[in-house]
Image (cartoon, helix red, strand yellow):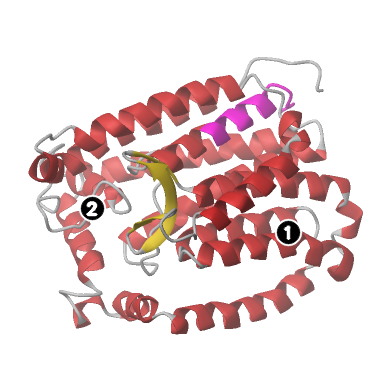
Amino acid sequence: MQTNKSTPDFILILTALALLAIGMIMVYSASAVWANFRFNDSFFFAKRQLLFAGVGVIAMFAIMNVDYWTWRSWSKVLLLTCFALLIIVLIPGVGLVRGGARSWLGIGAFSIQPSEFMKIAMIAFLAKFLSENQKLVTSFRKGLIPSLSLVFLAFGLIMLQPDLGTGVVLVGTCLVMIYVAGAKISHFIGLGLLGVIGFVALILSAPYRIKRITAFLDPWQDPLGSGFQIIQSLYAIGPGGLFGIGLGQSRQKHYYLPEPQTDFIFSILAEELGFIGGTFVILLFSLLLWRGVRIALGAPDLFGSFLGIGIIAMIAIQVIINIGVVTGLIPVTGITLPFLSYGGSSLTLMLMAVGILLNISRYARY
């Protein structure tokens, strides 16, 4: 149990709530046309997002008052639970298939995505392991291999769904944590070469992934197929100009850009609010990440530092990948934009993660 508890980071709270508010507005704007056509209710997605936002905010403020060392004590239980859920979700008839991936568990309209919660469970467990075995991190056999074994086991289960995007975020986050803990660069170079070979093998093993790569290189080669999403995303961003064409006035959300309220919500935001609106959102993310890094560096112990770095790395990687995809800089991966994209599991997880950061900030010195 930590001592000298102070007030949480007020700037972090405001930044997270500002991103959440922008996300709520954009989910409604991006989804209204499609929701009205499909469900005869233009607020269908917005109401569901508001429900999860409410649950997430309550969870954020509740977790803000839970000593972050609680996550250290329960990290093994959380990790084993998430592993069990990742196995259960693969059972035909139990796991729900959406977007070609068996990634969901639920009944009726309520469902969760276990792979999302695996990210925070793995971060907590790895933070505990690294804080207790930091001297061994420089050892390939005693430090690096044990650290990565569970990570790649989780990655393998996630790939069986398959969900490459979430798997990449999980692995990337854990690699950042291990590097910060003091792992040798030479070990990373060797693992990086193996990783590239494995990544290429994963791409070649699935025809749809090959199409995503070719679409990324030249989307106009197949404008009505694999290149459709990227082209429509660029058609949304381009006309936005400096100030945008106006909130709610997007053309691409009229059945051109598929599911605009999820992975490609930043495209609609850039179209309606322009370069200024997109830049403002990126600045908010930058502010959130800066406060998070300061909190992690000021944490009173190694566990708090590694936990904070893991959370910030997870958010940063998702933001970079998502915005990279919608601007045509990265192949399509299916990664949501934190706090903005429609999705209950992702939104709830992000707000819970911010709650953990806020609790660390109550003990941090910065």
Looking at the rendered structure, the kind of residue marked 1 is Tyr
Crowdedness near tag 2: few (<14), some (14–19) or many (≥20) residues, C-alpha within 10 Å: some
Side of 216 relative to 233 (left or right): right
Mark 2 vs mark 1: give the one in front.
2
Q: Secondary structure at mark 1?
A: helix
Percent across and percent down for residue 347 are 43, 38
Percent across and percent down for residue 201 are 52, 83
| Closest to the observer, 75 or 228 | 75
State the residue at coordinates (62%, 20%): 8
For the residues bearing labels 2 and 1, Cβ distance under 8 angstroms: no
Q: Magenta part of the protein: which range?
A: 352-366
Q: Which of the two labelled residues, at mark 2 and mark 1, occupies the earlier sequence position?
A: 1
State the residue at coordinates (67%, 60%): 151
Percent across and percent down for residue 139 are 88, 66
Please check the rendered image and state whether residue 130 is part of the magenta-colored stretch, yes or no. Answer: no
State the residue at coordinates (49%, 55%): 89
Please identify the residue farthest to the front as the structure is shown: 93
Q: Which residue is mark 1?
A: 179
Secondary structure that dominates the magenta span: helix
Please check the rendered image and state whether residue 356 is part of the magenta-colored stretch, yes or no. Answer: yes
Q: Which residue is mark 2?
A: 259
Percent across and percent down for residue 146 are 80, 62
Q: Secondary structure at mark 2?
A: loop
| Closest to the observer, 276 or 356 | 356
Side of 171 relative to 273 (left or right): right
Q: Quadrant of the N terminus?
A: top right
Image quadrant in which you'd find residue 54: top left
Residue 5 drawn above or below residue 227: above
Crowdedness near tag 1: few (<14), some (14–19) or many (≥20) residues, C-alpha within 10 Å: some
Residue 80 drawn above or below residue 235: above
State the residue at coordinates (49%, 42%): 286
